[in-house]
Image (spheres, rainbow, N blue to C red):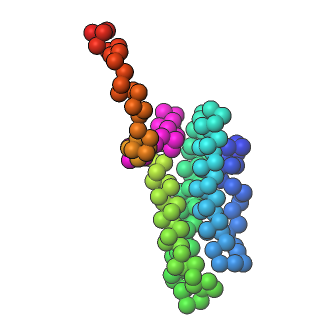
Amino acid sequence: MVTPMLRELAGPFPPFFWFEEPGFPYERGVRHLIDAWDRACHQAIQSGSVEELHAARDDYQAVLTGHLKVLDGYSVLANRFSGEYLHPELVNRLPRLRDQLQKHYDSLFPRWQVLQDLEAILLERVSLSNDQLKELAAKNPPPQAWFDEADDTLATVL
């Protein structure tokens, strides 16, 4: 069954891959899949609807796998008929687009199996890296008053 979350993640269906302009289904489709994931993650974090996103896991994995296979198929056809292909610049972009989508897929699967895996993935999206934390600490040192405090509460507890 197509849920609203799956519709958001997958985009319009069926995906019409016959096109009139170079790169129509590929660049827009890859960009949509990745941007939709970003929006869905943001929404899940903001609204606490992580369970709804997790419920779409298997379907979303199938959508990504299907798009990767379509890109693979078009690459095969474009290379087989390279002299006759209408948009040779697209042939050069297909590997980059496929790599982008594969990188997105690899960032989720097989790691995302259960709800806790998704929660960890979402937590990483909103957490600062150690380098970012060090940079912030360097730009914003603690106030001198913290160092000047005479009362050492930890020492009095021990």
Vertical position of residue 41 compared to residue 143: above or below: below
What residue is at 69 percent from the left and 49 percent from the top?
8
What residue is at 72 percent from the left and 78 percent from the top?
20
What residue is at 49 percent from the left and 72 percent from the top?
95
Q: Residue 69: percent from the left, percent from the top?
A: 54, 64
Magenta span: 113-132
What residue is at 67 percent from the left and 43 percent from the top?
5
Q: Residue 102: percent from the left, percent from the top?
A: 48, 60
Does 31 sit left or right of 115 as displayed? right
* Image quadrant containing the C terminus: top left
Vertical position of residue 127 compared to residue 105: above or below: above
Vertical position of residue 79 compared to residue 5: above or below: below
Report the front residue among 14 and 109. Answer: 109
Q: Quadrant of residue 134?
A: top left
Question: Is any part of residue 137 visible from this angle?
Answer: yes
Q: Is residue 84 magenta?
A: no
Report the front residue among 85 and 126. Answer: 126
Q: How many marks?
A: 0
Does 142 sit left or right of 6 as displayed? left
* Image quadrant containing the N terminus: top right
Kindly report the secondary structure that dominates the magenta region of the rendered protein.
helix
Q: Is residue 130 magenta?
A: yes
Q: Residue furthest bottom?
A: 83
Q: Residue 156: percent from the left, percent from the top?
A: 30, 9
Q: Residue 151: percent from the left, percent from the top?
A: 35, 15
Question: Is any part of residue 113 visible from this angle?
Answer: no
